Amino acid sequence: MARTTETPPPQPTPSSPWRARLAAALDSDLFYSFKRSKLVVAAAVLALGIVGAAFLAPLVAPHNPHDLATLDLINANIPPAWESQGDHRFLLGTDDQGRDIFSTILYGTRSSLLIGISSVLLATLLGVSLGLWAGYAGGRIDSFVMRLADVQLTFPAILTALLIDGVALAIFRNYRLEGGKFWILVVAIGLAYWVQYARTVRGVTLVERDKEYVQAARLIGLRPAKIMFQHILPNVLSPVLVIATINLALAIITEATLSFLGVGLPPTEPSLGTMIQVGNKYLFSGSWWMVAFPGLTLALLALAVNLLGDWLRDALNPKLR
């Protein structure tokens, strides 16, 4: 008698890892908290729109404000296109150098975002490292780091950034700093905001260092640096992420303040703060658009990021679930 072979049922093809992760993310409590708030969704759309337009400025902007060959002083101080003396080529008008305000806002927002993101990354790296070190080591190291943080907290962040910027300019006074102003601003703002990260991470580390998994890591001979960054660090990422999101808006505003005070980027590489500083000189002459539109962009960007930071703080707080 012939033996019949049964065909095995087809096995379901496993989905790709990124699809599984995407499905898990869309089914998470965090995404549910996000989509249930129309204000947070609107803030996210606004932030993504501004950030996307800024980083795609070479493709979106109708003019290039950095190309001096295309500038003409005859086009200076032209009002927005909808006014009687406006020009359809310049939707939001032009500045004192004949640059298109709309294009300059896109490029300036990109500069402000790059400075803000870079300074937040620097502050996060410095603050988290010092917080882990102080909380894990304790003793004199903890006292030294916390006293250093207490001293810096007595000065407003803008004064700390001004002090660091002034010291850098004094040290490099014999060099051309047009290209280095970006990094001077990043270091100045980053060093002004590391304290919040250090104090938060240090508090969590003091609690985590005496738990069983840390004791077990010590028993098997792991180095303190590996214990801090591989075992303790994942438990402090949630508050650090919230602080970083909120500090991004503060860093952008601080950069705008420094630029408004005249210690920001040079006029050839405008940021939102530089545009507001230049436009303020022509405000009483009737050229309101030179300061109004950059100021509105800065306010909307800071508001959207702050709203996202407040939502993230509440969503990641287990006591509010």
Image: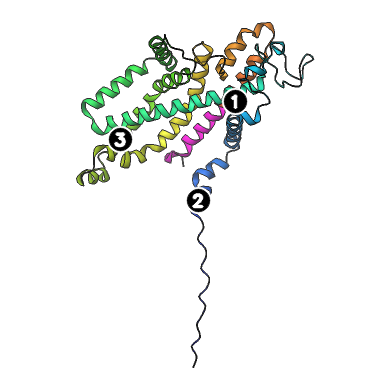
- List x then y, in percent, for residue 307: 54, 31
Q: Is residue 142 left or right of residue 248?
A: left
Which residue lies under the disc numbered 3? 205
Which residue lies under the disc numbered 1? 300
Q: Which residues are magenta?
A: 303-321
- List x then y, in percent, for residue 217: 24, 45
Crowding at dot 2, Cα within 10 Å, few <14 / some 14-19 / many 20+, comes out as few
Name the residue at 46% across, 14% down: 177
Which residue lies under the disc numbered 2? 18
Q: Main secondary structure of the magenta part?
A: helix
Which kind of residue does numbered mark 2 sit on? Trp
**Element at label 3:** helix
User: Is residue 218 on the magenta stretch?
Assistant: no
Name, please, the residue furthest toward the right: 84
Name the residue at 36% across, 15% down: 154
- List x then y, in percent, for residue 197: 38, 29
User: Is residue 320 on the magenta stretch?
Assistant: yes
**Element at label 2:** helix
- List x then y, in percent, for residue 11: 51, 68
Which kind of residue does numbered mark 3 sit on? Thr
